[in-house]
Amino acid sequence: MKKNQLLLNFAVNSMKNAHAPYSNFKVGAAILADNGKTYSGCNVENISYPCGTCAEAGAIAAMVADGGKKIVKIIIVSDGNIMITPCGACLQRIKEFSTSETEIILTKGCEEIKTVKISDLLPLAFEEF
Ligand code: THU
């Protein structure tokens, strides 16, 4: 079995439950947190479009509600034929719970293709005030 296959399967199972009737683009995310537990989420759209939420937001909310503090790894999958990368808002959400070691695992067609750090996707992030 590939290194991140269980986390990937978890994300894919969540993705299958996505509510995406407006974009027809299903997304799933799964997190391995610092407490050793895993959490998943999917995009949940709404007829009032701005009310929709991203898969990453759901997974992060589940982690925080259960006491997880940091993301060790997050994997994102979609049912589209593109490499799925987190949107800008989700990069900021991931940043909040990342360390310099956090792995962001990107996929295409539900196959792992690239692992990056938050600093690769969100350099010069707003983090202190
Ligand atoms: N989407 C996510 O769930 N995560 C992302 O990082 C990118 C976009 C969702 C939002 C919307 O439901 C659909 O994909 C199309 O934008």
Image (tube, rainbow, N blue to C red):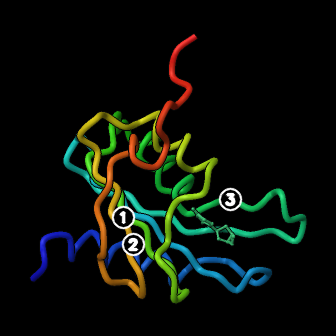
Local packing at callout 3 (Cα closer than 10 Å; few below 14, some 14-19, many 20+) is some
Q: Amino acid at mark 2?
A: Ala
- Give the spatial CA distance, label 2 vs label 1: 7 Å
Q: Is mark 3 within 8 Å of ligand 1?
A: yes
Residue at (34%, 73%) from the top-left corner?
Answer: 10
Residue 103 image offset from top left, x and y in percent = 28, 52
Q: Quadrant of the C terminus?
A: top right
14 left or right, relative to 115: right
Q: Amino acid at mark 1?
A: Ile
Local packing at callout 1 (Cα closer than 10 Å; few below 14, some 14-19, many 20+) is many
Mark 3 vs mark 1: in front: 1
Please give the label number shown on residue 53.
3
61 left or right, relative to 97: right
13 left or right, relative to 102: right
Residue tagged 1: 75
The answer to whether residue 41 is above or below residue 101 is below
Q: Amino acid at mark 3?
A: Thr
Residue at (52%, 31%) from the top-left corner?
Answer: 125
